[in-house]
Image (spheres, helix red, strand yellow):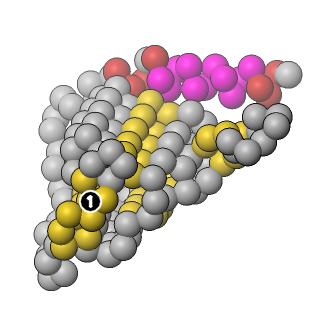
Amino acid sequence: MIKTYLSELRLYICNNLVCKIPSHTIRLWFYKNIMKFKIGTNSYVYLNCKFDSTLGLTMKNNVVINPRCRLDTRGTITIGEHVGIAEDVIILTSDHNVHSKKFEGRNLAVRIDDYAWVGTRAMILAGVTLNKGCVVAAGSVVTKSIPPYEIWAGVPAKKIGVRDKDLLYVINYKRVFH
């Protein structure tokens, strides 16, 4: 009972107070030390991002998660290097089995590999893998895994193109008050 209460209090503080602090240094300290997220160097989580649980997020180096994203960390979210996640993206790791007579919930991991790019207001559903270099267009709903270097768009998202495989960029986008 007390453990549940403290866990819920920690989430409340994270999602209603800490996420609004205009200092990345303070937010990063809280995410690493209190939420127990694993966050690499030159990786940033901007203002007003919300989480559903502790421990469920691993970000490697040079990752940017822009403002107002929702990361459902009840399952696990693993993000590779040089990944850009635009504003208002939703990443879900939990859902309900539609074939269950008891409406049972389930947690399914989401993995986003190196050089993937997720556009504004896209939604990634539970159990999906965004393989290396893939792009999800703004407003898309991704219901299944995307092969490497493919560009997907739509609801539900479908392949619309292929991306160059010689990606050399480093994501290192840092704003002082963001």
Residue shown at 76% from the left, 34% from the top: 103
Magenta-colored segment: predominant secondary structure: helix
Q: Which residue is mark 1?
A: 152
User: In the orientation shown, which residue stands out farthest toward the right?
Assistant: 1
Q: Residue at x 42, y 24 (%)?
A: 18
Residue 117: quarter of image: bottom left
Q: Is residue 78 visible?
A: no
Tell me where the magenta segment starts and ends, as one range.
5-15
Using the rendered image of the protein, determine whether residue 11 is visible from the camera's viewpoint. yes
Residue nearest the observer in this picture, 27 or 101: 101
Name the one closer to the observer, 46 or 131. Answer: 131
When the figure is inspected, residue 137 is found, relative to residue 5, above or below; the finding is below
Horizontal arrangement in the rendering, residue 11 relative to residue 61 (left or right) = right
Where's residue 81, x and y in %?
32, 66
Residue 91 in the magenta stretch? The answer is no
User: Would you place residue 153 above or below residue 53 in this image?
Assistant: below
